[in-house]
Amino acid sequence: MRVVQTSSLYETEPMYVQDQERFLNGVCEIDTTLRPMDLLDKLQAIEHDMGRVKTVDKGPRSIDLDLLLYKSEHLTTDRLTVPHALMWEREFVLRPLRDVLVNRTQGAVNPRSLDDSLQRVEHKPLNMFSQVPLGSESAVIRANDPRRPTRVMSILNVTPDSFSDGGKNDPTEDEALKATILSHIASGATIIDVGGQSSRPNAPDITADDELARILPAIAAIKSLPEAAHIAISIDTYRAAVASAAVQAGAHIINDISAGTLDPDMLSTIARLGCTYVMMHMRGTPATMQDPENLAYPFGLIHTICVEIRARLDAAQAAGIRRWRIILDPGIGFAKTPEQNVEILRGLPALVGYRGLENIPWMVGSSRKGFIGKITGVEVAKERSWGTAATVTAAVQGGASVVRVHDVGEMAQVVKMADAMYRV
């Protein structure tokens, strides 16, 4: 058996026997040569090996593997019914199944019939929330929970040439670096994003070894602090070798501005690492992203971003990255004009709800960017906190689950206020 793709992972309340723990539910599409009854035997053997002991029908169990569909076949025996007889009444089956089948036009189940069935069962809400794991303390993002707190990702650039804070954090100055990290944590960051390669337009390229020499001391500094035990460590890189070494050193998240387009080994590396992966929409490279051809969106900006990032999502899943490990980013400032950046902030609800991208969390990184300076007239990047605050509020209102910021304390307050207004 080979896993082809997975759904998002959903946490749900128990549906039948109420006195038990909440469940995690997902759907896997697999490629197999086994026939249905042989596959059922295999699934039940896996359940047994994982310690399942069935005591009460639909009661507590450590694992439950059901065969929902088998190609376009219909089968009824005393042990197995395909398509699964009860799936049409179960939102915890239909929703993840829709993730997997959303673009299918052939098969035993049509995605539109799934939509219709979901509408019929959604009047009995299960408080069913998708989950993306973040850090070592089992923190998760529940992208479709209307009450979820927005996560603050602080920017810790250890570069000499980033656009607004280059040279501020020297990776060789351990005590100063730890003081900055502690400040970020005290100010409200729950994710720290470490950057060792500037991605500003026309930034000089560096080697993977140079990038690692910058970020590895920062990872070590974070992990050495007891106050950072709950912090998710993110690494801002588009290089597979850097991603691999960073995760081995203790990073939890890889934040890739290229969604795997700048290094052909990135997607397979992320699949092997099994870490959470932020995929950003960008065209070209940091050197070419502002070229005219990369700024043209003749079929509409929001629609085109969704189509192009959906293609990268499909590529990621084909490489073996699980859907429940993915966070999306519309790429504000990357292959976008100032006007287009504003359009993204205005159109976030359409991005978040785009067919095939539902229930995946989005991150927005607008902090101090050039379009804010152009609109407000503030030329110095580090003085753009007021304009940034407006964009962070728009991001929360639009449905972002994570905001990536420089001014941690100020933006954490903005997020708290925006959450109070919009996360209800």
Image (cartoon, grey):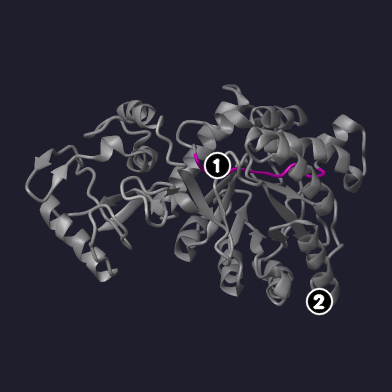
The x, y position of residue 4, in whole percent, is: 33, 51
Q: Residue at x 27, y 65 (%)?
A: 52
Look at 52% across and 52% down and name the residue there.
Answer: 132
- What residue did someone put label 2 on? 174
* The residue stretch that appears in magenta: 359-368
Is any atom of residue 305 visible in this view? no
- Residue shown at the point (32%, 33%) measured from the top left: 104
Amino acid carrying mark 1 in the image? Asp
Q: Residue at x 42, y 47 (%)?
A: 12
Is 146 situated left or right of 43 in this image? right
Q: Quadrant of residue 140?
A: bottom right
Query: Between 259 and 408, which is closer to the camera in this rendering?
Result: 408
User: Disc 2 or 1, which lies upstream in sequence?
Assistant: 1
The quarter of the picture where residue 233 lies is bottom right
SS category of the residue bearing label 1: loop
Q: Horizontal and vertical percent for residue 258? A: 60, 48
Residue 239 or 154: which is nearer the viewer?
154
Expressed as whole percent of the image width and height from the top left, the position of residue 77 reads 7, 46
Q: Which mark is residue 145?
A: 1
